[in-house]
Amino acid sequence: MTDPGATVTGLLAGQGYRAESVRPLGSGLDHTAFEVDGALVVRVSARAHPAERALEVDRETRLLHRIAAISPLPVPTPLYADPAGGWLAYRKLPGAPFLGLPEPAAWATTVGTALGRLLAVLRGQPPEAWAGLVENDDVPPHAWLREARETYAAVAASVPPSQRGAVEAFLGAAPPPATTRRVLSHNDLGIEHVLVDPATGEVIGVIDWSDAALVDPACDLGLILRDLGPDGLDAALAALPPDDDDELRTRATFYARCSALEDLAYGVGTGRGAYVRNSLAALARLLPPRQ
């Protein structure tokens, strides 16, 4: 069996970089990540077909450079990219993922404001300027709800019995109306992708832009609500330009509830306790037990 560490060392050697240490960071459906010398992150595409890997790495490299040029927060910027080899590398950003830090509510306003400013800059970009770099995510709310029902069926035993009635009532209700409005967004702005200074809560980076897309503007706001609560959402909205979308908060709440169930399933399935704890806390806020 091929040693992944040796493979990464070989990839970097081809770029003139001599790696001393390689540590696996984790893997998902899209890629496997490694930390090199405590200074670099190498991401290797998980796609099976070479042409798909090349297109993915080329697209993400160009996207990250474009995002870095406008973002008010640091984002990964590729130092090495090899589309033909299906991998890219960027300098590791400082800070710690907000997920798993104690008392996240204490910094909800600080983090929410920073993320709102980021979303404001992204929304200021005309959607047509991102053609070829991001896709149009047109999954309607009824499809979100259908998937949430399927997810809940698999994780219901992990939800406290006192709360199941509220969750099931939500899943049995109609979803909010869809919107045709689309804006450039991170599209996975959970706190696992938000790097902060553990001493102050200051946001010092946003990572993993592989899901960036043109989406309903409520989607990332829903993740902010899920992870930071109402104070975080209010802070993010205050940092955005005024919006005449009367249903924005309603859809954000809907997406927050669906994504809390999705993250709960991920945490249970992978044994990642931080995701389970965060998801259950979110469900308790978003769908409190019925009296």
Image (spheres, rainbow, N blue to C red):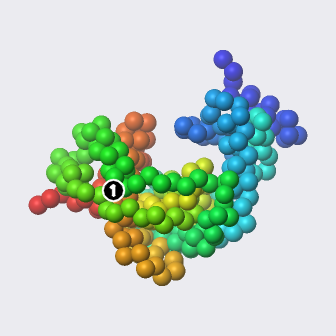
* Total labels drawn: 1
Residue 272 vs 102, above or below: the answer is above
- Residue for badge 1: 257
Give the quarter of the figure containing the N terminus. top right
Residue in front for this viewpoint, 52 or 83: 52
Which residue is at a point 33% across and 56% down the rendered structure image?
257
Please state the horizontal and vertical placement of residue 177, each as a whole percent of the image. 34, 63
Bin the neighbour count of mark 1 within 10 Å (Cα to Cα): few under 14, some 14-19, many 20 and up: many
Q: Position of residue 146 (x, y in %)?
A: 32, 46
Q: Residue furthest right?
A: 16
The correct choice, above or below, for 49 with respect to 147 in the image is above
Residue 269, given in percent of the width and then of the height, sits at 39, 36
Specify the quadrant that holds the C terminus. bottom left
Could you tell me if residue 198 is visible in this image?
Answer: no
* Viewer can see residue 211: yes
Residue 134 vs residue 283, the one in the foreground = 134
Residue 49: name its quadrant: top right
In the image, residue 200 lies at what x, y percent?
A: 54, 69
- The residue nearer to you, when weighing 141 against 149, is 141
The answer to whether 202 appears left or right of 140 in the picture is: right
Relative to residue 206, is residue 91 drawn left or right?
right
- Judge left or right: residue 275 versus residue 187: left
Amino acid tagged 1: Arg
